């Protein structure tokens, strides 16, 4: 009986000690792992990793081409319900797949992938313009200007099927931002 009273009295102290011990030094292994992954994603790639990144960027390019074609078809048919559904899907696709793929800065200056990187950014802005998100289009324009500063003469494919300099593409995108 006496041991039970002591245990009842010590239990809250032991529990508080365990809880306090869990939150002491601020070391969070999950945070450390995320920081390492972020550092790896930011580092320029080479060899097989670069080939895989190029393949991922090209796949995203094909996806955006198909999404844009589908959007145009739905708009031409005046299928507003389907346009709204595609809008939601595209917003989620961009947030979960495209934006993380476009996040690293190195690929905007790497000679093997910078053209597809720029083309993806322009296509993203075009789709956002068609979705009527001018603020987000302006964010993409600002991002393109920051990443490709001093390379306004670089050739890009914008609009799809036409080649222009990056500077001309930015001007065209600014003009289309409000007219889509």
Image: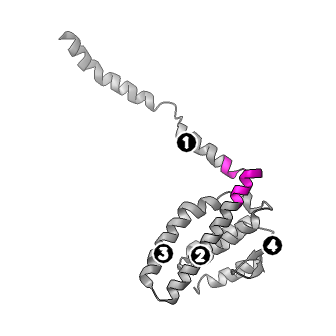
Q: Which residue is mark 4?
A: 154
Mark pair 2, 1: CA separation: 37 Å
Which is more foreground, mark 3 or mark 1? 3
Where in the figure is residue 172, as x and y percent of width and height?
A: 69, 83
Question: Badges 4 and 3: C-beta atoms under 8 Å apart?
Answer: no
Question: Which SS class for mark 2?
Answer: helix
Disc nearer the start of the sequence (2/4):
2
Residue 41 on the magenta segment:
yes
Where in the figure is residue 24, as x and y percent of width and height?
A: 48, 30
Mark pair 3, 1: CA separation: 34 Å
Q: Read off the magenta span.
A: 40-54
Compared across the picture, whether 110 is left or right of 174 comes to right
* Residue drawn at 24 percent across, 20 percent down: 8
Question: Badges 2 and 4: C-beta atoms under 8 Å apart?
Answer: no
Question: Which SS class for mark 1?
Answer: helix
Q: Nearer the viewer, residue 159 or 63?
A: 63
Q: Residue furthest left?
A: 1
Work out which quarter of the rendered image holds the N terminus and state it: top left
Where in the figure is residue 47, as x and y percent of width and height?
A: 77, 51
Question: Which SS class for mark 3?
Answer: helix
* Residue drawn at 80 percent across, 70 percent down: 151
Mark pair 2, 4: CA separation: 25 Å
Residue 78 on the magenta segment:
no
Q: Which residue is mark 1?
A: 31
Q: Which mark is residue 86?
A: 3
Visible in this render: residue 44? no
Which is more foreground, mark 2 or mark 1? 2
Mark pair 1, 4: CA separation: 38 Å
Disc nearer the start of the sequence (2/1):
1
Classed neighbour count for the residue bearing mark 2: other residues with Cα under 10 Å, few (<14), some (14–19), many (≥20): few
């Amino acid at each position: 009986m006496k041991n039970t009273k002591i245990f009842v009295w010590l239990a809250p102290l032991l529990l508080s000690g365990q809880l306090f011990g869990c939150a002491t030094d601020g070391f969070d292994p999950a945070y450390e792992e995320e920081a390492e992954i972020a550092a790896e994603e930011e580092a320029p790639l080479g060899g097989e990793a670069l080939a895989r990144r190029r393949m991922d960027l090209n796949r995203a390019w094909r996806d955006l081409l198909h999404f844009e074609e589908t959007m145009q078809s739905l708009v031409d048919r005046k299928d507003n319900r389907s346009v709204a559904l595609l809008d939601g899907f595209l917003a989620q696709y961009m947030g979960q797949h495209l934006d993380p793929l476009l996040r690293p800065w190195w690929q905007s200056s790497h000679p093997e992938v910078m053209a597809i990187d720029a083309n993806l950014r322009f296509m993203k802005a075009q789709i956002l313009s068609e979705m009527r998100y001018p603020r987000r289009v302006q964010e993409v324009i600002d991002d393109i200007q920051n990443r490709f500063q001093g390379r306004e003469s670089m050739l890009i494919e914008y609009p799809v099927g036409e080649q222009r300099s990056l500077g001309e593409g930015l001007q065209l995108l600014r003009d289309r931002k409000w007219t889509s």
